[in-house]
Amino acid sequence: MKVKKTVCECIVFFSFKKLYFILDVVVYGSERETKKVITMELGSIFETVMLVCFGFSWPLNVMKAYRARTAKGTSLLFILLIIAGYIGGISAKLLNHQINYVLVVYFLNLGIVLVNLCVYFRNVHLDKMNDVVVKNHAAKYSA
């Protein structure tokens, strides 16, 4: 069934159980193709919301770790798993030819997590230096 419409309307509203997204667009093709396009676009919007939330939390984590000047309480494995996750997400977008604004957000978040990785190694180095200073100080005053 081919339908041609000239008016574009976008309505988003919530009920207690579902999110309804109604999009009235220019349609050249079947109703099934239109639903697929709407679902893909809605999926990109939700994916972007998730990435933006992560994107706001990572800089806060980097600043906290930088000010703490210690790697205690920070997991290298966790940071590496997050990096692997972002690389997987970027790879999926590229392999599926979904090159859009969401891909940019993936790269920004990956960059911030890589900065966090650098701060982690800086803090590990500072922890080692502090351990040497404490040992020297203890040896000097215990004798």
Image: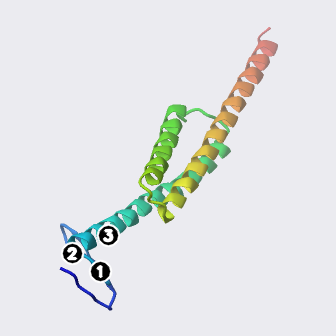
Q: Characterize the local packing of mark 2: few (<14), some (14-19) or many (20 or more) Cα atoms within 10 angstroms.
A: few
Q: Characterize the local packing of mark 3: few (<14), some (14-19) or many (20 or more) Cα atoms within 10 angstroms.
A: few
Callout 2 secondary element: helix
Residue 19: x percent and y percent?
25, 70
Tell me the CA gap for discs 2 and 3. Answer: 10 Å
- What is the residue that sits farthest to the top in this orientation? 143
Dots 2, 3 in contact, CB < 8 A? no
The amino acid type of the residue labelled 1 equals Tyr
Between 104 and 97, the residue placed more toward the observer is 97
Q: Residue 74 carries which label?
A: none
Quarter of the rendering occupied by the N terminus: bottom left
User: Which picture quadrant has residue 23?
Assistant: bottom left
* Residue at (48% x, 64% y) in the render: 100
Dots 1, 3 in contact, CB < 8 A? no
Disc 2 vs disc 1: which is toward the camera?
1
Tell me the CA gap for discs 2 and 1. Answer: 9 Å
Q: In the rendered view, does 75 fall on the left or right side of 36?
A: right
Residue 12: x percent and y percent?
30, 78
Callout 3 secondary element: helix
The amino acid type of the residue labelled 2 equals Glu
Between 72 and 89, the residue placed more toward the observer is 89
Q: Which mark is residue 28?
A: 1
Q: Mark 3 points at which residue?
A: 37
Mark 2 or 3, nearer chain start: 2
Callout 1 secondary element: loop
* Residue at (66% x, 44% y) in the render: 66
* Residue at (27% x, 67% y) in the render: 36
Q: Mark 2 points at which residue?
A: 31
